[in-house]
Image (cartoon, rainbow, N blue to C red):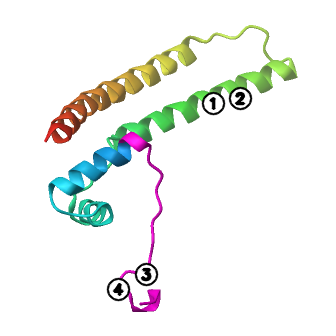
Amino acid sequence: MGSENRKRQRMVPIRLSDEEFERLERKADKVGLTVPAFLRELAIRQRVKSPVIDRDGAVEIGKQIRAIGNNLNQLTRLSHDGTIEVVELKETRQELHEVWRLLNSVLQATQTVSSTTAREKQKNETE
């Protein structure tokens, strides 16, 4: 039979290490499926979790970084024009501190979810 008679006409090639393929093969065999059928079932039936990103936090971080960039550009222009010779960076330092605080809170939230996801992954691999 030619490929025109097949129900599935699209292919999605992936690269795996020997170890990954063997693990996949064992899992597929365990449930009585071929590797392609097993992957198809996983891909279609598995609920995919969206990335762990706090969108509001990311937007706020972006705003803070843009504000700092604008301030630094203004200071650089004034310095090049000779308008200022000494720059007080207290406000910039405070803004940077706020950005670091936001980044750390996002990082901590991500690490908490990542460690939970890692535990779930280990559990699934042992099954």
**Relative vertical location of residue 38 with respect to residue 62 in this rendering, above or below:** below
As helix, strand or loop, the secondary structure at mark 1 comes to helix
* Nearer the camera: disc 1 or disc 3: 3
Q: Residues within 10 Å of mark 1 (few under 14, many from 20)?
A: few
Q: Is residue 92 magenta?
A: no
How many angstroms separate mark 4 from mark 3 (CA)? 6 Å
Q: Is residue 10 left or right of residue 84?
A: left
Amino acid type at circle 4 is Lys
Q: Residues within 10 Å of mark 3 (few under 14, many from 20)?
A: few
Amino acid type at circle 3 is Gln
* Nearer the camera: disc 3 or disc 2: 3
Contact between marks 3 and 2 (CB within 8 A): the answer is no
Q: Between 76 and 84, which is closer to the camera in this rendering?
A: 76
**Which residue carries the number 1 mark?**
69
**Which residue carries the number 2 mark?**
73
Contact between marks 2 and 1 (CB within 8 A): the answer is yes
Residue 7 appears in the figure: yes
* Nearer the camera: disc 2 or disc 4: 4
**Which residue carries the number 3 mark?**
9
Q: Is residue 8 magenta?
A: yes
* Nearer the camera: disc 1 or disc 4: 4
As helix, strand or loop, the secondary structure at mark 2 comes to helix
Q: Between 32 and 74, which is closer to the camera in this rendering?
A: 32
Highlighted magenta segment, given as a residue range: 1-19
Amino acid type at circle 2 is Asn
Amino acid type at circle 1 is Gly
As helix, strand or loop, the secondary structure at mark 3 comes to loop
